[in-house]
Amino acid sequence: MASIPKDPIMLLSYVNMQLRDFYPSLEELCDELGVGREELEERLGGVDYHYNPARNQFV
C-alpha cells in the first residue's frame, strides 16, 4: 500500500490532485497505489466528501 496522508483533509487534497493530474478514475488510482476504494471512500466520507465520477474528484 502506498503511503498516503492520514489526516482526512490532507488525504482529500492528495487524492484530488492525483485524480486531476494522473488518473482518469478512482479505480485506477486505487489499483496503482494499492489502496482499497472502500477504505478511501469511508475515510473521506467521514469528513463529508464523496466521489463524483463525472468530475473525477471528491466533492
Image (cartoon, grey):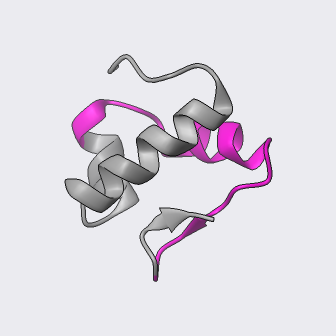
Q: Is residue 33 above or below residue 19?
A: above
Question: Which residue appears at 79% of the width and 53% of the height?
Answer: 48
Query: Which image quadrant is residue 33 in?
Result: top left
Q: Nearer the viewer, residue 41 or 56?
A: 56
Magenta-span inclusion, residue 33 = yes
Extreme residue toward the bottom, this view = 54
| Residue 35 on image: x %, y % | 41, 32
The answer to whether residue 34 is left or right of residue 11 is: left
Residue depicted at x 59% and y 19%: 6
Q: Is residue 50 magenta?
A: yes
Q: Is residue 28 left or right of residue 58?
A: left
- The total of numbered circles placed on residues is 0
Q: Is residue 1 above or below residue 10?
A: above
**Quadrant occupied by the C terminus:** bottom right
Q: In the rendered view, would you say 59 is above or below 46?
A: below
**Magenta extent:** 32-54
x then y, percent, for residue 49: 70, 56
Residue that appears at 31% across and 48% down: 18
**Does residue 39 appear left or right of residue 37 in this picture?**
right
Q: Residue at x 50, y 43 (%)?
A: 13
User: Which residue is at the front of the view, 37 or 15?
Assistant: 15
| x and y percentages locating residue 4 in the rendered image | 43, 23
